Amino acid sequence: MKKILISLFVIVLLCIFSICGAESNLNSGSGASLSGSGSGASLSGSGSGASLSGSASSFSDSSYSSESSSGSSNSGTTSSTPSSNSQSSSDFGTVIYPSDENILYSGRFDTTQSPDNYYGFSWSGCQISLSVTGTTTIKPILDSVPAQGSPSGENWFDVIVNNAILTPFNVSSIAHQEYNMIGSTSLDPTQTYSIVLSKRTEASFGEVRFYGFSVDSTGKTVPQSKPTRKIEFIGDSITCGYGDLGTAPCNFQAITEDNYDTYASITARELECEMYLEAWSGRGVVRNYGSPTPTSSSGTIPLIYQYTIPTDTSINWDFDQYIPDAVVINLGTNDYSTQPAPSQEQFQSGYIDFIRAIRKYYAQSPPEFFLICGPMINNPCCDYVANVSSIVGATYIDAQNILVEPTDFGCDGHPSLSGHTKLAAVVSPAIQKGMGW
């Protein structure tokens, strides 16, 4: 009898230890959400020296669970149905989804990928903006889809927090991940922060996909407004910002390109405009750089302009989404930089046809057109651009011979930051005068 009682006692003890061990595992923090503890320092409007590591942490797909939920508002709430609501709880805190009504987008975004809950984009200068409060941390969830023949991990972004430009970061992952864009500095949850992600690099480096922002469970977005003026820039490497961060002589690398510092972005900010921008280095009106023939049969700006993502010809842009007040075009440099160049008739006819096509896209509210020539090309190209301006009723902006100092040049003969500042000083007043702004 004693043996039986001892055996039963041992079994009871083993069961107790087993239960306690299970509780210990549950409380070990293996599924802990973002604590947002940081360093305790708040990020001020001046940037407070916060560094940006650009490091990525794996993002769990479990946050995209599809249990049905209804009746949630579009901001400030949590939900487990990302296809119809803006936020969801996850192991990383709360995810603010791309569809949140308080997130603003400038530039062309593919918003049709609802099963995968991401917005895709690739054109230079695309921006994601939001105002957020109630959180100590915020991390964008992104991945990169390299273009064919392009190196992976070359999609760079500027981070602007309360008008302070922080350290840029590079979206290098092909699987969506959180990116630490404010380093170890904590946000003050009692404050509201205005945050902008601006795509520095061009479409040739591939598509970026945006899955939302990871914040604390108490984080929520705040309504914000866009500028009422709208402007669109169309161009080539100059408008992209090719090599603008380099110091001549230098060869181009993705890290030397920053669209935020181009004449186009400077002009848009000076004139208080929302900006859409479609530009690609090496492309022309009828002939791309280095073409062995006077005209190119593919890849010119008029041939890729209609696409949301220029590397994906299956998605046409909906031109009703954004109707600019002004369209500014700077093309022709690549048509005439090398031989064999197109004839005057080929170039002018192609340019006129392109402008007519744009006018059809915006027929319900025709914008004013401004055609730039320079600063990397001269005559006869600029004479032809001036002719086209006269024929179509556009304003011609002459930007020839404005880069005169060694510091005006970045990589491969392109404008540096100084060069773009000089170009903006020519372009911005001309548009302001033409638009009555």
Image (cartoon, helix red, strand yellow):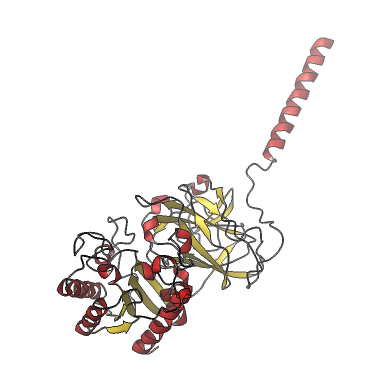
Q: Nearer the viewer, residue 156 or 36?
A: 156
Name the spot of residue 196 as percent of width and height, x first: 51, 67
25 lies above or below 94: above
Residue at left offset 41%, top offset 75%: 264
114 lies above or below 383: above
Residue at left offset 69%, top offset 33%: 22
Name the spot of residue 388 as percent of width and height, x first: 22, 80
Question: In which quadrant is the N terminus drawn?
Answer: top right
Q: Is residue 176 visible?
A: yes
Q: Quadrant of residue 378?
A: bottom left
Give left or right: position of 255 versus 322. Answer: right
Give left or right: position of 273 versus 48. Answer: left
Name the spot of residue 302 as percent of width and height, x first: 25, 67
Q: Nearer the viewer, residue 153 or 98?
A: 153
29 lies above or below 135: above
67 lies above or below 50: above
Residue at left offset 45%, top offset 48%: 174
Name the spot of residue 137 as percent of width and height, x first: 62, 59
Q: Quadrant of residue 404?
A: bottom left
Give left or right: position of 356 versus 310. Answer: left
Give left or right: position of 142 versus 373. Answer: right
Q: Nearer the viewer, residue 225 or 252?
A: 252
Q: Is residue 110 visible?
A: no
